[in-house]
Structures are given as structure tokens and as C-alpha cells.
Image: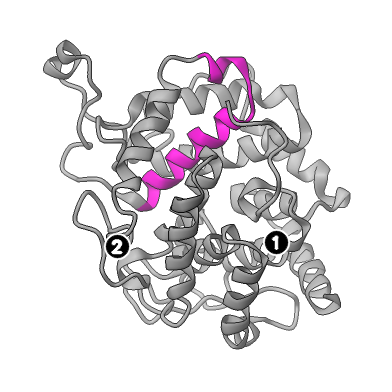
Amino acid sequence: MPESALLLSNALKVVSARTTSHSEALALLASGDPTYMPQVIAYARSLSPSGYVAPWPEYGGAESIWTMGYRCMFLAEYYMVTNDFQVTTGLVQRVTMLAKSDTMYSSYGHGGANVYPYHKAAGVHGTSDGGYGPVNACGLVANLGVALGKRTGLPGIVTNAEVQPAITRAYNFYNFLVYKGGVNYGDMEPNNEFVQWGSQGKNGIAALLFTAMGGCPTQVQYFSRLSMAGWADMEHGHGGVGWARHWQPMGACAGGTNAVVAFMANRRWFNELTRRSNGSFAYECIADAMVSSANYWDYTSLGGFIDPTSWNALHLAFGKQKLLITAGTPIRPTR
């Protein structure tokens, strides 16, 4: 639609003027606009410096599960669009490290699993990081990064002994929820609310995870429908509702054109109220993280992982279908 194209163009101008992070870069990449590709390329290559070795992910360390998962997701989508060989080291290193550092159940905490001698003796992965249990909000993105990484077909990923077992564990962990309820905070009973206070966009990421795995139409449809069902309550959420605003529409998009059109039609009033005259979007939340930053007019949201203008640009780019996570057709087959 002409209106959506104009909104996307204006939002991209705002996003491109900022210091690039994975959130901005993903929106620029999804747009398919060649004007912004030099900026996207520069950011992608910055994540893969010469000699890069992925660290064991630790909360507060060089890279946490949060950081590594989002970077891995971006790099995999970027590589499938560009075939840019210069990012392969950063991508392969992160995918294989994420596959190594999940728990024996496929869940993740803020950092990699605790691996004790008895885990090694039994030949299994460890358990969730010390002092904190699984956090599906970051764990799903980490699993998505691994599944997308395998989609690239890069030998260092496809032949790695850790990768397919990690994807299988993820399938088993989240497939258990199908027809039982939505994705909850961590390793607990299925959420029976289906909407945002409990799910916080995680149903949307689950829909994309099964899309990336391939051959999982039942699971994709199930989690996509849960994403659609939550359109009426996206104003509450632990840590703020930015996660829901980012991922919930993407889960609906995984269900197809009719699904995402219906979802966005129900949310149009809210998106219009958050749109600013300069093309950017505001973020408001009445839950426990009420604004995106100290100043209402600032854009930094949720620790720099995602921000409202970027996620709205990403949604406005659904029609471009440039990325797997925006309902595009993967360039490479599932292996």
C-alpha cells in the first residue's frame, strides 16, 4: 500500500541516522533498499573481525546469550541475502557456540549452561546458569539463531556435531507445548493466558523457530495463532512490552498474509498513536518498564536490543519478504 511504503521510507531514514545495532541493521536489511546496504554491510562485518572466536556466553561478559542470539540471527539472515563471505567466521563461531552452550533441555538462561564433571561423564549438556533458571525470551532467539545458521548451508555449521542435536532438543522442548498452551517465562507449565503478560512475544519467536527448522506446519500454525490471539493485550509485560511489540506481529506474519493483515488491522489504531511526525515511533508501557529510556523522546529501548522505530520498520517491510523471519522464502533448503 502507498501509505505503508511512505511510513516505511520515513522510518528507515530515522533508523539509518542512528548508530547501527542489530535492531537497526535488521530493519534496513528487511527493507531491501540498496541505499542502506553499505551501512548494513559495515555493521555485519564489524561483528566478524579477523580471528574472532566466540566466547562462552556469560551475563555481563563480552557476549551474553541475549547478545549472541540476536547477533547470530541477524548474521544468518544477512548471509542468506548477500553471501558475504567476510561474515562467515563470526556467524559460524556464534552458531556453534550457542549450540554448545545450551542446556540438556535446550533452554538457555542469561548465560551459557553450567557444565559440571558429572555432565561431561554422562555425555550431556549442563543445566541453566547459576542462580537463575531458563529464560525463554532470550533462549528462543538463541535457538532461532542456530536454526537460521543451519539454513545458510555453511559447512562449518552443517557439519558441526553440536548443531543438529541442539536443533532437535529445541524441537522437543517447544513442540511439547503444542495444543497445551503458550510459551511461559522459563522451564515451567505451558502458559494458559496466551497473551502478553505471560508470553511477551515468545509465541511469535516460537512460530519463527519452527519456520526456520522447516517441515513443521502444525507447530508454525499453532504458535502463529497464539500470536494473533494476543493482539488485544499488548500493554503489559515483565521487562516492558517491547518484546511483544517486536515479536508478536512477526509470529502472526509466519501464519501467512491473511493472518498478519488481520493482526495489523486490529493494532492499527495503536501504531498510529505512537507514530511521530518525523517518521519515528514512540514506546509506552504501563507495566514494570514504563518507558524506553530516561527521556520519553529518546529511542533506546530495552538495553539496546530493540527499539520501536526499528521494529515498526521491520513490520512495515513484511510485504518485501526479504528475510525468512519476515515470511520470505529461504534461499537455501533445509539440510
Residue 4 visible in the snapshot:
yes
Residue 176, position in %: x, y? 29, 48
Q: Does label 1 or label 2 sit earlier along the sequence? A: 2
Viewport quadrant of the C terminus: top right
Residue at mark 1 to residue at mark 2: CA–CA distance: 27 Å
What is the total number of numbered labels drawn onto the structure image? 2
Q: Amino acid at mark 1?
A: Phe
Of 2 and 283, nearer the camera is 2
- Is 145 included in the stretch rendered in magenta? yes
Q: Residues within 10 Å of mark 1 (few under 14, many from 20)?
A: many
Residue 55 visible in the snapshot:
no
Task: Classify residue 318 by image quadrant.
Answer: bottom right
Q: Which residue is mark 1?
A: 318
Q: Amino acid at mark 2?
A: Gly
Task: Classify residue 17 by image quadrant.
Answer: bottom right
> In the picture shown, does residue 87 fall above or below 272?
above
Residue 211, position in %: x, y? 54, 46
Of 136 and 298, nearer the camera is 136
Which residue sits at x=82%, y=50%? 36
> In the picture shown, does residue 82 fall above or below 304?
above
Tags 1 and 2 touching, CB below 8 Å: no
User: Mark 1 or 2, which is nearer the eye?
Assistant: 2
Which residue sits at x=81%, y=79%? 3
Q: Secondary structure at mark 2?
A: loop
Which residue sits at x=27%, y=32%? 103
Q: Is residue 297 left or right of residue 192?
A: right
Stretch in magenta: 137-159
Mark identifier at residue 181: 2
